[in-house]
């Protein structure tokens, strides 16, 4: 059963917008329905593989009304069908529900999205930075983060040769 | 003609000269290879270029057994505390070669994560330009370092004690604007803790 039908049957009204490009189906789902949509896709639709979780920052993007999009890529390994779900969140405190209890592999992907975009994942078992150091304050893939950072790369004590 | 052991079998020199001679010709490199320069570093050590000809073939992967740190490749901010700790773990006397454009200046990677020259954080003796440098350039740097050791070295390492200032470039004001917060990680002592004065 196609992903759209699965969601419409088990989670009616969840899809707010649908885009199709050749065999690539993209569904926009509100953030309060994203968890149920993903759950029925996994449990009823056979989309058992979570390929990726990533995010997009739509700051200064033409005609964009929301700041962030969180993107879930799913695959049905029995039929090869793929579907992309996107949910839109905004400042301040963007937050989406964690899907770690559906796919254990979502753990590190959600941590990476949190690290790079500052999007929190509710009910994540261990939500902390995965790439940047623990004390890091910014979220580097946000469009308003300067390319050269806020000086983090210079914030170390130099070693003097006479002392070591 | 008989050799007189009391007069003919020794010569007088300075202790500094002997120490420098031994140190310059038995450099044990610590390969801090983080990027493609590391491949050239390996090439230099292997048979075609044969760094062993200059007494520097004994690559040790423990800093406790090394006296020449070769930083080959870009260093990111997360790596700086590690690099400083490894440098401090090396026993005296020790030297540092900054190999390649990235280690010396950040190279093309002028981003928030990449350190703009390791000499901002650890003392460097010889810089090698190039992206990556040819093995001949690394050999040249080792020879230059040998000459530096022979020219300035002392038995007790007083030439190191005289280097009491940080030798890297000062921060360019445009790099850290006044309105930018200085945030993030710790120093070599803690590796992760926030600095108290930050």
Image (spheres, rainbow, N blue to C red):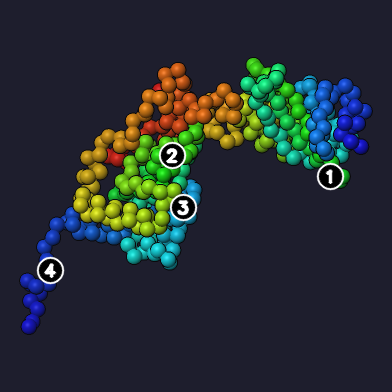
Instruction: Name the residue nearer the viewer: B192 or A110.
Output: A110
Quadrant for the C terminus of chain B, please.
top left
* Quadrant location of the N terminus of chain B in the rendered image: bottom left
Q: Is residue A129 left or right of residue B175?
A: right
**Residue toward you, B184 or B169:** B169
Q: Which mark is residue B106?
A: 2
The lab-note entry on whether marks 4 and 3 share a chain reads yes
Q: Residue at x 48, y 55 (%)?
A: B39
In the image, residue A26 above or below residue B60:
above
Q: Secondary structure under badge 2?
A: loop
Q: Position of residue B6 (x, y in %)?
A: 7, 72
Which numbered circle lies on residue A109?
none
* Nearer the observer, B149 or A21: A21
The residue labelled by disc 3 is: B38
For marks 2 and 3 on the same chain, the one whose residue lies earlier in the sequence: 3
Left or right, A102 with reference to B18: right
| Foreground tag (2 vs 3) | 2
Write down the residue under mark 4.
B10
Mark 2 on the same chain as mark 3? yes
Q: Which chain contains the residue that carries disc 1? A: A
SS assignment at label 1: loop
Q: Position of residue A7 (x, y in %)?
A: 88, 29
Q: Are marks 3 and 1 in contact (CB under 8 Å)?
A: no
Report the residue marked by disc 1: A80
Say yes or no: labels 4 and 2 on the same chain.
yes
Q: Quadrant of residue B168?
A: top left
For marks 4 and 3, the one nearer the N-term is 4
Q: Name the residue: 76% across, 28% down.
A: A86
Q: Residue at x 43, y 55 (%)?
A: B41
Are dots 4 and 2 in contact, CB under 8 Å? no
Can the viewer see residue A127 in this picture? no
């Amino acid at each position: 059963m196609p992903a759209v039908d699965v969601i419409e049957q088990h989670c009616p009204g969840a899809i707010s917008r649908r885009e199709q490009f050749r065999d690539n189906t993209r569904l926009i789902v509100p953030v309060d329905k994203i968890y149920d949509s993903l759950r029925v896709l996994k449990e009823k639709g056979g989309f058992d593989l979570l390929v990726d979780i990533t995010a997009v920052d739509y700051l200064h993007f033409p005609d964009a009304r929301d700041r962030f999009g969180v993107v879930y890529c799913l695959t049905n390994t029995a039929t090869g069908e793929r579907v992309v779900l996107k949910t839109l969140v905004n400042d301040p405190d963007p937050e989406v529900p964690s899907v770690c209890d559906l796919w254990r592999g979502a753990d590190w992907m959600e941590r990476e999205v949190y690290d790079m975009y500052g999007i929190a994942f509710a009910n994540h078992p261990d939500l902390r930075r995965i790439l940047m150091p623990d004390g890091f304050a910014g979220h580097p893939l946000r469009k308003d983060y300067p390319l050269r950072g806020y000086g983090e790369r210079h914030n170390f004590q130099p070693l003097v040769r006479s002392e070591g | 003609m008989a050799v007189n052991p009391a007069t003919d079998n020794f010569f007088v020199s300075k202790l500094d000269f002997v120490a420098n001679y031994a140190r310059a010709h038995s450099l044990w490199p610590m390969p801090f290879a983080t990027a493609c320069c590391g491949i050239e570093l390996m090439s230099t050590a292997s048979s075609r270029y044969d760094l062993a000809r200059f007494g520097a073939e004994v690559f040790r992967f423990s800093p406790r057994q090394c006296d020449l740190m070769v930083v080959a490749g870009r260093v990111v901010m997360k790596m700086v505390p590690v690099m400083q700790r490894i440098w401090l773990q090396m026993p005296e006397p020790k030297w540092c070669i900054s190999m390649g454009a990235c280690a010396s200046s950040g190279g093309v990677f002028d981003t928030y994560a990449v350190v703009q020259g390791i000499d901002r954080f650890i003392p460097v003796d010889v810089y090698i330009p190039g992206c990556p440098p040819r093995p001949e350039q690394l050999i040249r740097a080792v020879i230059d370092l040998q000459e530096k050791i022979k020219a300035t070295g002392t038995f007790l390492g007083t030439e190191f004690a005289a280097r009491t200032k940080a030798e890297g470039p000062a921060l360019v004001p445009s790099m850290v604007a006044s309105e930018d917060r200085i945030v993030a990680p710790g120093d070599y002592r803690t590796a992760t803790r926030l600095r108290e004065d930050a």
